[in-house]
Image (tube, rainbow, N blue to C red):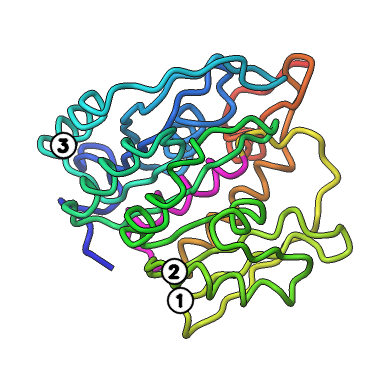
Amino acid sequence: MAEPAGTGGAAGPGGGAPPRVLTVAGSDSGGGAGIQADLKTMLALGVHGMSVVTAVTAQNSLGVQDSWTLPVAAVRAQFRSVVDDIGVQAVKTGMLAGAETVAVVAELLAGTPAPVVVDPVGVSTHGDRLLAAEALDVVRTRLLPAATVVTPNLAETAWLTGVRVAGEADMPRAAAALLAYGPRWVLVKGGHLPADEGAVDLLTDGTEEHWLRAPRQAVAHTHGTGCTLASAVAAQLARGRGVPEAVAAAKEYVTGAIAGGFPLGAGTGPVDHGWRWRTAGGGPARTP
């Protein structure tokens, strides 16, 4: 794993800037996923979040009504503007929309000496496609080799590899298929496994295996879970943690965020990025 660029460490009063994390993703106008979720997660975990917007969506609790992909020149300009002046300790990618954008982002990441967390977003929580079908090969051959950690859910794992995970026993085979594309680590997320298997994820680099388990929660409002987890991993890497420690800490954070999910609008509400503040009594309480 490449060393993070710039200086690290948490900031205190007068202690300089906190670690910096860049999200390269789409905007969610409803605020539950995408860049909005990424920046909320980064703030909650004590790092400075920055953004490269790849697409704009008209999105709410019911789904994505429309989306517009930004020109690749705009993506490149945003990335260079931030990285060349401010620097980054970690990068997280999310919705990249099209093959040309994926290729440009992969090129930019290859020249950036910071760990990269790739959330291979293909379909939203509501079932809306967020990546063009023709971008699949570019994700496999260009983006995944740039990843320090790739964080697919089961549908994305099947989409990328053809391996369908029906139970925990299938997860090592799926992870091996993903590792064949070149990421350093793979986190296969088992959140959609049968309820009796719990919320189990497998993190592996092909040598080590780390099984992360949490009780399955009977909650309805889970919008933004994948974005939040990937951003939490990036934040922990930027703070200097190794990959297994970063992923374990991120899972603990997202488990609490899922438990705190709340209703918005007429559909699926978001996870609660500020759950730790509210649990500790240090942040604003939600009103019914």
Disc 2 is placed on an element classified as strand
Q: CA distance from mark 2 to mark 3?
A: 27 Å
Residue kind at label 3, given as amino acid type: Ile
Give, as a single range, the part of the protein colored magenta: 225-243
Look at the numbered discs 2 and 1 and tell me whether their residues touch, using CB distance below 8 Å.
Answer: yes
> What is the crowding at mark 3: few (fewer than 14 residues within 10 Å), some, or many (at least 20)?
few
Q: Quadrant of the N terminus?
A: bottom left
Disc 1 target residue: 205
Would residue 235 be counted in the magenta stretch? yes
Which quadrant of the structure image shows residue 101?
top left
Disc 2 target residue: 185
Q: Position of residue 215 (x, y in %)?
A: 79, 59
Whether residue 11 sits left or right of residue 155 in the image: it is left
Q: CA distance from mark 2 to mark 1?
A: 4 Å
Q: Position of residue 70 (x, y in %)?
A: 34, 21
Residue kind at label 2, given as amino acid type: Trp
Whether residue 113 sits left or right of residue 264 in the image: it is left
